[in-house]
Image (spheres, rainbow, N blue to C red):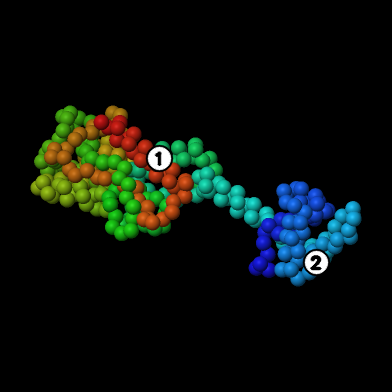
Amino acid sequence: MSEVELRHVATMAAVADEGSFGRAATRLGYTQSTVSQHIAALEKVVGGAVFDRPGGPKPVRITPLGTVVLSHGRDLLERREVMTAALDRFRAGEGRIDIGTFQSVSNVLLPLVVRQLREEHPGCDIRLFEDESDPPPVDQVDLMFFDSRVDGDIEHLKLLDDPYVLVAPRGAFPEGPVQLASLHGAPMVAWPPTCDQPRVEQMFAGNDVQPRIVFRAAGNEAVLAMVRSGLGSAVLPRLVLNSAEADQGLSIHELLPAPPRREIYLLWRAGRTQSPLTTRAIEIAAEVAAQTQARRV
């Protein structure tokens, strides 16, 4: 049975539906001799006749063996149609994409990427995974947003530079840039010593500045809420503050000297053939990041 060809099964189904080789040939766009050849090849593989041929104007009749073959054959034809439709959707971008992300990207960049993907491909299946581990599990997703380069067989697309700034309770500092030295001993709200926080604390140490950490929280909103309450200030990447820039309870200041900027990348496994949906997601992410960067200039 491994030698059965679906085109032969499709021809058999057409003959059964039409009742004659001639009408089946017209329906399929074949010659009648081609239909006969397909049926003969099928009968050779299955080991017997699939049609009784009475001759003349009488319709052909399916044999008991043919009934078995056609029953399973129609299932195969239906599965082929489903697969063909799925492949067509895949080529058109209507597939599945798994995207890894982290907090600030999830809040600012990713919603715009997802919205545009869904507008262009309403039938796509988008699955998101927030992961703060370092290194990130790039091999488990199609695309991964991350805030640094990663060693290994990985492609990198830099999306934007994300400067660190000081966010403080309104009125805690005069308008304009703030000197790092003025934060020595100042109460600070911070992330736990994971993710970006070690970079911030290394930056302080490198400038002989030791702020007083009064609260640590992993959630951006919790950090901003504590700053808004007056508990202390925080040094955060600008992307985190995208929705807080108009907050009347907060003020945002550049730092002098300016800390090294965080870099936001889109990562994927090198040498991997991307689906059309993934390729389009990369393009949209680059466009959204460029728009976000332009709004800051």
Q: Nearer the viewer, residue 275 or 44?
A: 44
Q: Secondary structure at mark 1?
A: helix
Where residue 213 appears, as percent x and y from the top left, is 20, 47
Residue 46 location (% of width, % of height): 74, 68
Using the image, tell me which numbered label, if any, was put on residue 158: none
Instruction: State the image coordinates of residue 84 (x, y, percent, origin top left).
Output: 60, 51
Residue at (79% x, 64% y) in the render:
50
Q: Nearer the viewer, mark 2 or mark 1?
A: 2
Q: Quadrant of residue 180?
A: top left
Q: What residue is drawn where x is 85% and y is 57%?
A: 60
Out of 80 and 218, give the one closest to the viewer. 80
Instruction: Work out whether 36 lies above or below 45.
Output: above
Identify the image quadrant of the C terminus.
top left
**Residue 231 seen in the current view:** no
Q: Is residue 145 visible?
A: yes
Mark 1 is surrounded, within 10 Å at the Cα level, by few (under 14), some (14 to 19) or many (20 or more) other residues, namely some
Q: Quadrant of the N terminus?
A: bottom right
Instruction: Name the side, left or right, on which 179 lies relative to 296.
Output: left
What's the amino acid at mark 1? Ile
Q: Residue at x 49, y 38 (%)?
A: 120
Residue underneath mark 1 = 284
Instruction: Please give the label number shown on residue 49.
Output: 2
Query: Is the C-beta separation of discs 2 and 1 under 8 Å?
Result: no
Residue 204 in picture, x, y percent from top left: 15, 47
Tell me if residue 130 comes above or below residue 3 in the rendering.
above
Identity of the amino acid at label 2? Ala
The Cα–Cα distance between marks 2 and 1, rounded to whole angstroms, is: 57 Å
Q: Few, some or many C-alpha atoms within 10 Å of disc 2 (few <14, some 14-19, many ≥20)?
A: some
The answer to whether 192 is drawn above or below residue 179 in the figure is below
Judged left or right of residue 251, residue 119 is right
